[in-house]
Image: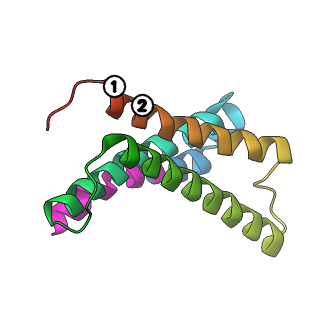
Amino acid sequence: MLKQLFKILKFPLLVLVVHVLATVLGWYANIEHFDKLMHALGGMSIAVGTFSLYSLLRQRKLVGTNHLLVISIAVVAIVVSTAVAWEWMKFLIDTLTGSHMQISLTDTMGDLLAGTLGGTIISLAKLFLPHKK
């Protein structure tokens, strides 16, 4: 079970570790477009993890559909929900601590778009590229 959990969480955890490291090292402030790259990678990692979770649930016969288009749409919906939750978390931290993680509405919307595009790219790749059954 631990091996399966690691398979689901390894990419999101890797992106989170890079995020913490990048925050400490100042990469967000010093590398142009780094923030959008991280949001796109975050969306991709959530999509990969969600496809892995679906595969595990399917093996255990806990989900019924095997229609890849339906699964891909659900994966993108989960990515979007995760991106929104992340931005809500940043808003809450800014509100409670007076920090400024959310620079502007335009920045926040760009973050959401980057995460959504990242997850969509993975879902489209899953739909249209050859893969193992």
Q: Which mark, residue 115?
A: none
Three-letter code, disc 2: Leu
In this rendering, the answer to whether 111 lies above or below 5 is above
Q: Is residue 100 visible?
A: yes
* Residue 103 covered by magenta stretch: no
What scheme was used to colour the molecule? rainbow
The percent coordinates of residue 91 (x first, y second) are: 76, 64
Instruction: Name the residue at 55% across, 37% down.
Output: 40
- Find disc 1 in the rendering and name its residue: 128
Instruction: Name the residue at 42% across, 31% down.
Output: 124
* Magenta region, residue range: 1-16
- Find disc 2 in the rendering and name its residue: 124
Taking the image as shown, residue 96 lies to the left or right of residue 112, namely right
Looking at the picture, tell me which residue is in the foreground, 94 or 62: 62
Q: Can you tell which quarter of the image residue 93 is in?
A: bottom right
Taking the image as shown, residue 51 lies to the left or right of residue 104, namely left
Instruction: Name the residue at 53% across, 49% down.
Output: 19
The percent coordinates of residue 70 (x first, y second) are: 39, 47
The percent coordinates of residue 13 (x first, y second) are: 39, 55
Quadrant of the frame with the N terminus? bottom left
Q: Can you tell which quarter of the image residue 88 is in?
A: bottom right
Q: Residues within 10 Å of mark 2 (few under 14, many from 20)?
A: some
Looking at the picture, tell me which residue is in the foreground, 41 or 61: 61
